[in-house]
Image: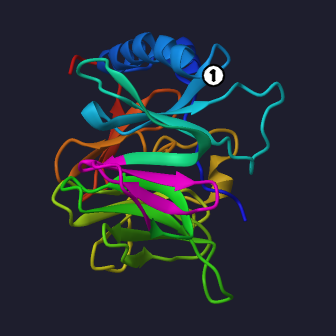
Amino acid sequence: MRKLFLCITALAATQALAADRMNPADLRRVTKAREHLVPAVAKEFGPKARFVHLFGQGRGMLAGVVAEIPEQALGTDDVPLLAIVQYDEATGAVRVVDREFKYREARTVGRDVALLDGAGNLRVREANGRERLLAQGVGGDLFPTAKGDALVATLQMSGAHKHETSVGIIDMNGRVKVLADGPGVDATPSISPDGRTVVFVSGRTSVASFYVTDVDGATPKQLTNVGLENWMLFGGPPKEFVPPPVSSHHMEWVSDDVLRYNAGGGEFWKLNVRTGAAAPDLGGEQ
């Protein structure tokens, strides 16, 4: 089954290739993160180690570190396993969370850290250092609630009656609830600050599009790319096409109604999850 670990472009490449399209505030964040993380990773893990993913924002931002960049490009289904460090955007402080190269993703959830290993086991490391298994069969795309009492994620479904992946919510007691399970892939969820609205990406209409549901599992509604089919994208997408996010790790909510996300190459878009209105967020100070 296709793994749903959606790679973020390495920050060095992002800065070099998309600086002309990036909001100045985002460019500053990228530059600052590199300045602090590059020397800290080299000191803690050796000169061949590189940080290749950022998870979340602010004080609770985490970074995934590979032991070294492979000489040959990885296949589509190959997942580089990561060690995890924490990076505080405000102070620039970096600390090691776990030195073992065995994780696919990590996210700060309240005072705790959720760690997803290569086998799909989701564990929580509490502030006191105690670790416990939270859920199994988790595909990735972790996104915590603002309260830190749960997180939404892509789930790996099994059985003939199940689709390839689904979107679910996992509370901190390990209870898992499926919110969306349409044909094919439902993935990349995010949950609004008020803890009610869940948006995710689905290809159920043949074009990757945003859908919206809620924590009660209401019937999903398509928000973007309504009426588009995949053949319409040949030769370049039409002007009404709204690109999907590269991952859930670079999503942030401007309000309970507006989601800001990385659409690739460092270019951010804003999406109104009530109306489906979306547009690039390319310029201006923040």
Residue 95 vs 13, above or below: the answer is below
Color encoding of the figure: rainbow
Placement of the C terminus among the 4 image quadrants = top left
* Residue type of the residue flagged with mark 1: Ala
What percent of the width, then of the height, locates residue 90? 23, 21
Q: Is residue 58 left or right of residue 176?
A: left
Horizontal and vertical percent for residue 270?
31, 40
Rendered position, 84 above or below 47:
below
Would you identify the image quadrant in which residue 131 lies? bottom left
Q: Is residue 124 magenta?
A: yes
Image location of residue 73, percent across then percent down: 79, 32
Q: Is residue 132 above or below residue 272?
A: below
Query: In the figure, 165 relative to 159: above or below?
Result: above
Please report the residue visible at 40 percent of the width from the left and 14 percent of the height from the top: 36
- Of 280 and 216, nearer the camera is 216
Residue behind mark 1: 49
For the record, the magenta segment spans 108-133
Which residue of the protein is positioned furthest toward the bottom in this rendering? 161
Question: Which quarter of the rendering shows the N terminus?
Answer: bottom right
Q: Is residue 141 in view from this perspective?
A: yes
> SS for tag 1?
loop
Left or right: 122 as drawn, with respect to 74: left
Compare residues 142 and 173 and report the one nearer the observer. 173
Residue 189 appears left or right of 238: left
Residue at figure coordinates x 42%, y 71% from the top left? 168
Residue at x-position 62% and y-position 71% = 184
In this orientation, which residue lies closer to the viewer: 85 or 127? 127
Whether the magenta-drawn stretch holds residue 55 is answered as no
- Quick check: can you spot residue 241? no
Q: Residues within 10 Å of mark 1 (few under 14, many from 20)?
A: some
Count of picture labels = 1
